Image: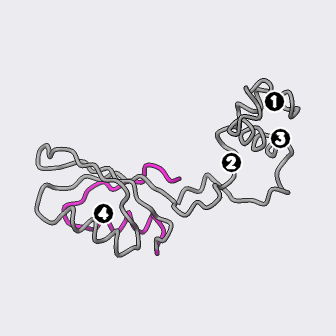
């Protein structure tokens, strides 16, 4: 899991955090036409807005998916990729996208976007399980959304 993010109650946050969320929502809805007008109307500096705008957000309403990007190398042998997909399925992880390169030196790079919202194990455990699969090398978590 990505431990760089925390979920906290809004009452614990300083006022500028609430204003950044407000600005983002009003910019998206078109209520503010630009960031200068938005920061002036809410009373925070543009530098504060730019410093935190990509780090403060609210969860999307109705969001049911939690996505993760995975990378791994798979030896070019029948059944290796199938075992990876079966293992993900065993952990209740759905594959959203998959891209495999042409094998070079009998190894193909695989990039996957997966839905981990129903996963029955932490991603660290899933990656460790993938690393134990024959023909699978260097499984990595690239990002989590």
Per the image, the residue denoted by label 3 is 16
Sequence-first tag of 4 and 3: 3
Comparing marks 3 and 1, which lies closer to the viewer?
Answer: 1
In the rendered image, residue 107, in percent from the top left (x then y), is placed at: 16, 49
Determine the residue located farthest toward the front in the rendered image: 30
| SS type, badge 4 | helix
Q: Secondary structure at mark 1?
A: helix
**Which marked residue is nearer to the observer: mark 4 or mark 1?**
1
Lateral position of residue 44 relative to residue 128, left or right: right
Whichever of callouts 4 and 1 sits on the residue coming sooner in the sequence is 1
Quick check: marks 4 and 1 in contact, CB under 8 Å?
no
**Front tag of 2 and 4:** 2
Secondary element at tag 3: helix
User: Which residue is depicted at the point 48% across and 71% down?
Assistant: 118
Q: How far apart, in angstroms, are the residues tagged by discs 2 and 1?
A: 16 Å
**Label 1, on which residue?**
39
Which span of residues is magenta-colored? 120-145
Q: CA distance from mark 3 to mark 1?
A: 10 Å
**Pointer 2 local density, CA inside 10 Å: few below 14, some 14–19, many at least 20:** some
Of the numbered discs 3 and 1, the one sitting upstream in the chain is 3
Q: Is residue 117 left or right of residue 16?
A: left
**In the rendered image, which residue does mark 4 sit on?**
131
Residue 33 in the image: x percent, y percent? 73, 27
């Amino acid at each position: 899991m990505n431990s760089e993010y925390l979920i906290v109650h809004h009452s614990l946050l300083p006022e500028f955090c609430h204003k950044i969320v407000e600005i983002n929502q009003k910019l998206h809805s078109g209520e503010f036409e630009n960031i200068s007008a938005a920061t002036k109307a809410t009373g925070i500096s543009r530098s504060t807005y730019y410093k935190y705008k990509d780090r403060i957000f609210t969860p999307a309403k109705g969001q049911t998916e939690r996505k993760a990007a995975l990378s791994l190398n798979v030896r070019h042998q029948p059944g290796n990729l199938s075992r990876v997909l079966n293992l993900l399925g065993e952990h209740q992880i759905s594959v959203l996208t998959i891209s495999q390169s042409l094998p070079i030196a009998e190894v193909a790079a695989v990039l996957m976007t997966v839905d981990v919202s129903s996963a029955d194990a932490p991603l660290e455990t899933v990656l460790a399980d993938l690393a134990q699969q024959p023909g699978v090398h260097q499984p990595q978590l690239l990002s989590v959304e």
